[in-house]
Each structure stands twice: as C-alpha cells, then as structure tokens.
Image (cartoon, grey):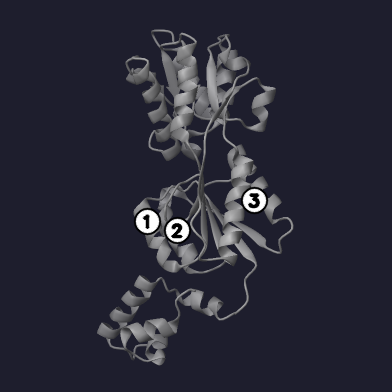
Amino acid sequence: MPKTIYDIAKEAGVSIATVSRVFNSSNSVKDSTREKILKIADDLGYHPQAYAQGLASKKKNSMMMLVPVMSNYFFTEILRGTQDVLADENIELTILNINQEKGVFRQVEQVIKRQWADGYLIVSLHMTQQELQKLKRYNVPISLLDDHSTHFDSVSFNNEQGGYTATTYLLGKGHRRIVFLSGRKEAIPNKERFKGYLKALRESKVPFDESLHITGDSMDRDGFTEKNGYEAMCKILNLDKPVDAIFCTSDIKAVGALKAMNDFGKRIPLISYDNLSISEYIGLSTIFQPMYKMGCQATRHLLNRIDNPDVIICDHIHNPELIIRDSSEI
C-alpha cells in the first residue's frame, strides 16, 4: 500500500499535525524538523496528492500507459493489444507521453508519486536498473514492455538475437559488405541489435567496417522514421565502394530506404525489423517482433499484479523469427 502521512509521522517521531503543517507550507515548524520530514517523505515515496487520492478505499479502475511517443506503428500495435485485453474490463486507459529529452526517470517518478492509476504500463522508456529499483519504493503495480528488469513484471524481445539472425542470413547468402542501417546509436534497442550484428560478423570472420554503420541525420523518435531511413540510404548509395546488403533496424526506416533505392534506380538486398502489417504488402524481409502479443501479455501481467500484488515477478523474453520476402532475395 502507498505510504501515508501516518507513516511519516511515526518515522519522524512527530505528530500527524506537524507533518500536515509541513505539507501545507506552514511557517510554524522548525527548519530542522521540516527538512527531516521532507527527507523521510521522499525516502518513503510519499506525495501529498497521493495521500489525498489514497483516502478512497476502492480501486480507481484506471490504468496508465507511459510511452515516449505514440506516432508510429510500433506503439499502435502495442496499444491495440492493450485495448483488446481491457475490452471486457471496467478499466479506463490513460496514455501519457514522456519527453525523452527532459529526463525519463524524473517524469516517470513524478507520475508514479501522484498515484493516478491502479497500475502503470511503462513502454520503451529504458530506465537503468538503479532507477527501476528506486521506483520499487512507491509500491505500486508496474509492468514493463519492450524492457527487461528483475524488479517488475516485464515483456521484452531478444534484440541481440534478432540482429544476429538477420545478419547471419545475409552472410549465408555470400554477402560481406553488410550495412548496419542504424537509428540513434545510443538507443537501447539499436545498441542491442548492433551487438547481434557484430557477433554474426565475428563468427564469420568478417572484419567490422565502421563506415558501414550508417544512420540518417533526422533524429526524431530516435531516428526510427521513414525520413531517417531515406537519408541513410542516400549516404549508402554515395559510398565510394558499393555494399552487398543492408540490415535495417526497423521496418519504418526500411520504407524510407526502399523509397531512396527506387528514386535512384538501385536494388540492394535488405532485411528489416518488426514485421509491421505493411511489411507483407511491400515485400519486406524482416525480423518478426510480436508487438500486439507483447501488448496483450504486459497488460495481463499488470492486471494480475493489481489483483495479486505478491505473485512472483514474470519476465517474458520473446525470441526472433526471420520472415523472408522479396527485399532480401536480389
């Protein structure tokens, strides 16, 4: 249960009235006492608004989804899974965008403190394990999606294995100069897929060429956009030495990359990542990431955690499946 004003008073060795005066900005409390109470409140994960909301004994019948952005197919598929699971539940879903440029943990913590919902579905925000550990003190149901942790229920994808599988297939076709068409290099999914790419090269004794680690200039949504894919492909087509094949880190980027190839009258074998619904219709070879299913699973975990707070933490990691279509068979 969330901590209350009574817990703070007990910990600080003061009356409830003293704690109340501190949170009501009264000047009648000594500075040393005020600082002590505020520190204890922070350590316990208490927030005044959380207390006010916690007075109600019944559930809020509300779930909150925290996401970095909702304007692409990846999150649309996840949201579809979540909504289907909630269709027969009397639960209101609220979606809150988190601005990655303004510090993810600070924003997530402020939301959690306010206890706006019965549980929180945190999607693709990739906080550190230390930050996730700090969220434990608020003692609220949390489910992670597209992330892994020992602290909370989580549903994720083996991105490293996905990168390895795609690159190994291209190497098996005899390709050696294989481009890693990247998103923002620091983005967690991008880094994991790159590890798999490097592992496949090492096993085939193909030296890594830094000039083949290419991304576009537009970094909106961590570079996982059609525009970034188009820009990156233009760079690839202008390399002094032609490339054999391309591993592209998302289907959305691949859409832009294929458009650039078409504009310049070029065809290069390409494998992408996600298997969005559009992939089948444009003949895109890709690593299947079951986004809809992951959305369903993470939501079910959260519902179960809300009703059964002491169940064992569930960590579900999906393994990749390579789907071959026309784009790699050139």
- Residue 132 appears in which quarter of the rendering? bottom left
Q: For mark 3, what is the residue?
A: 82
Q: Which circle's residue, 2 or 1, is located before the other in the chain?
A: 2
Front in this rendered view, residue 224 or 13: 13
Image quadrant for the C terminus?
top right
Between the C-alphas of marks 2 and 1, the distance is: 12 Å
Label ID, residue 131: 1
Front in this rendered view, residue 296 or 248: 296
* Residue type marked 1: Glu
Instruction: Count residues near mark 1 (Cα–Cα under 10 Å), then give few for <14, some for 14-19, many for 20+.
Output: some
From the top left corner, tell me how far across and down residue 300 is, in percent: 61, 54
From the top left corner, tell me how far across and down residue 145 is, in percent: 52, 48
From the image, state whether disc 3 or disc 2 is nearer to you. Answer: 3
Q: Is residue 226 visible?
A: no
Label ID, residue 114: none
As helix, strand or loop, the secondary structure at mark 2 comes to helix
Determine the residue positioned at 57% across, 55% down: 301
* Residue type marked 2: Gln
As helix, strand or loop, the secondary structure at mark 3 comes to helix
Q: Is residue 188 above or below residue 326?
A: below
From the top left corner, tell me how far across and down residue 223 is, in percent: 48, 34
